[in-house]
Amino acid sequence: MPLILYYYPSFERSLKSLGPEQRKIVRQLLSAVQVYYASDCQIEEAQKIAPRFFYKQLRKPYYEAGIESTLRVIIEREQSRCVAVLAGNHDDIKRFLANE
């Protein structure tokens, strides 16, 4: 299933609080998400780009993607339309979900 990835302004703001190395990891993470969907949701294909990549549903419509469990991205998904909502650590994700 082809993926159409959009970015909320909240995602862009969350990137500003990250350092250059962390932003590089987020770019790698988003690339892995695109490969994950392009390969018909084969986690092994995404892990070729990011060996410790994971992707899981939190609660509809939110999903969490991460690498090495240090940085994560919240994605709001409706069929093939995905919107990156927030980039951050575990605590940032918990705060976001608590406020939703």
Image (cartoon, rainbow, N blue to C red):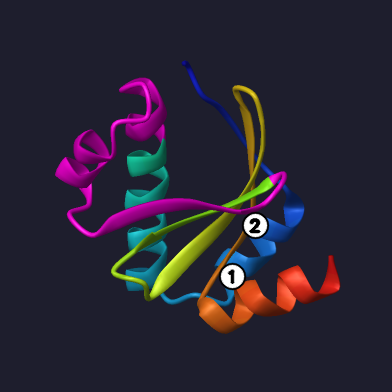
Highlighted magenta segment, given as a residue range: 34-61
71 or 53, nearer to the observer: 53
Q: Measured from the top left, where is residue 79 in percent x and y?
A: 64, 24
Q: Measured from the top left, where is residue 18 in percent x and y?
A: 49, 75
Q: Quadrant of residue 7?
A: top right
Q: Quadrant of residue 40?
A: top left
Residue on which disc 1 sits: 16
**Tag 2 near tag 1, CB within 8 Å:** yes
* Residue at screen point 78% across, 75% down: 98
Up the image or down, 30 lies above or below 5; here it is below
Count of numbered marks: 2
Residue 48 lies in the magenta-colored region: yes
Residue 86 lies in the magenta-colored region: no
Amino acid of disc 2: Glu
In the image, farthest residue toward the top: 1
Q: Residues within 10 Å of mark 1 (few under 14, many from 20)?
A: few
Q: Measured from the top left, where is residue 45 in percent x and y?
A: 21, 34
Amino acid of disc 1: Lys
Residue 12 numbered tag:
2
In the image, farthest residue toward the bottom: 91
In the image, farthest residue toward the right: 100
Up the image or down, 93 lies above or below 46; here it is below
